[in-house]
Amino acid sequence: MDRILVVDDDLQTLKMVEQLLLLKKFDVTCCLTFKDAEREMEPGRFSAAILDYFMPDITGLEVMKQFQSVDLNLPVIILTASRDIKVAVEAIRKGAFNYLVKPVDPDELYINLANALKNHSLHVENKDLKNSLINKYKVRDIIGSSKKMQEVFDLILRSSKVRSNVLITGETGVGKELVAKAIHNNSDRAEGPFIKVNCSALTESLLEAELFGIEKNVATGVDARAGKFERADGGTLFLDEVGDMAIDTQAKVLRAMQEREIERVGSVITRKIDIRILAATNIDLGVAIKEKKFRQDLFFRINVIVIPITSLRERQADIPDLVEHFLKKISDENRIKPKTLSKETMECFMSYVWPGNARELQNAIERSIVMCDEDVIQPSHLPSYMNGQLNEEHGDITSHSTISSNGESLEDQVAEFEKGLITSALEKHGWRQNRAADSLSISERSIWYKIKKLGIDLPNRKGG
């Protein structure tokens, strides 16, 4: 049974809403004051809240803010006696699920509450799914409850049940190696070795010796050494940044995959291998094939199952979960008391482009923890480039901005694109924040941050 919290200082309205909800068999908790309601609030206790806009000494929006700091995904419906559209726009902009004008129409109340509960249920299901995956499978370091990350989780689990080769794509820092490890750890090869080789870190000759090994006395003083293929026997070989591998080496890798055997450098003896190949790249291999930099036949070999990981800027709904994870992880590793983020700091995290993705986010949090002597991390503790300031640690390097030919930075261009995307979604859904957020597969809180950061107006003439 869904539990609903109702807060209104008008006893008549409070009783009326209570009776309407009881008719639908809801479990209702009624409060006349914010102080009473505050004592009732606990994470996960309520499925939704209905708050009066005007209350003595505090507004319903301020109450909503404090409640959502306890329960982030709590949907809130605002009641107001005012028909001023600005009040409605303010409520939606600040994160309310919707608003209703007094006296409350029963049908409107039921419809809005049903939608709010459906939204809340989806959030709970996503969280439960993530916890289930974490508990049942070894994917503890892969964080995200967005739709795109749920698709990644699904592909990880599907890939773990078969022995097919997998290609993991995505920008630097999105966590491709974590995905590869999760596939290995949940496969029938979990007891075998997981061997990684970075194909971009070595010259062609060194990479070949690293992959296939080397025979004794190939060069003076050189001892025999097993390569990565041999060491991965019975387990998984992870070819990181496979797109940077030289063409000649690609041919030898392809042969090893086809024949399931290798020859060490300087040897004519073949050695049988039993391995599974997982590969990752941050480049478009289709383009590399056209430019004759990557073999099409090798591409077909490794491209059996593809797991694309989107950039962090495309799944901002995952940022709060990642922040919480890294705060705890870094604090535990350093055996220090966990810190929290101020509202302003979280806004910085939500509005920043993150060209380095989750890896950059982790580094920013680690630096902030080091720089912060208090319990709460403020924007001043963040790397200076995140605030668009001169990065004094790197001389005249001001930020991660890339200046385009028209003089606009990468951040400016991305912001303009995001602004158009969000504005279009809002217009399409009648300027209803919750519906626009759902269509973009982000949380209402994320879209609220972007609306505020990008300065998107919700004017009356646009259907507010």
Image (cartoon, grey):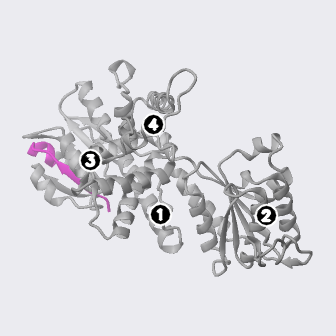
**For residue 82, above or below residue 370:** above
Kind of residue at disc 3: Gln
**Residue 363 rendering spot, x and y as whole percentages:** 43, 54
**Residue 398 rendering spot, x and y as whole percentages:** 43, 35
Q: Are marks 2 and 4 in contact (CB under 8 Å)?
A: no
The one nearer the camera, 252 or 92, is 252
Query: Which comes sooner in the sequence, label 1 or label 4?
Result: 1
Of badges 2 and 1, the one in the foreground is: 2
Q: Which residues are magenta?
A: 1-15
Of badges 1 and 4, the one in the foreground is: 4
Could you tell me how far apart the alpha carbons at marks 3 and 4 are, in whole angstroms? 23 Å
Q: Residue at x 25, y 25 (%)?
A: 86
Which numbered tag is attached to residue 397?
A: 4
5 inside magenta stretch: yes
Quickly name the residue at label 1.
130
Quickly name the residue at label 3.
378
Quickly name the residue at label 2.
208
Q: How many marks?
A: 4
**Residue 255 rendering spot, x and y as whole percentages:** 87, 64
Q: Secondary structure at mark 3?
A: loop
The one nearer the camera, 320 or 73, is 320
Q: Is residue 445 visible?
A: no
403 sits to left or right of 26: right
Query: Which comes sooner in the sequence, label 2 or label 4?
Result: 2
Q: Are marks 1 and 3 in contact (CB under 8 Å)?
A: no
Query: Which comes sooner in the sequence, label 3 or label 2?
Result: 2
Kind of residue at disc 2: Glu
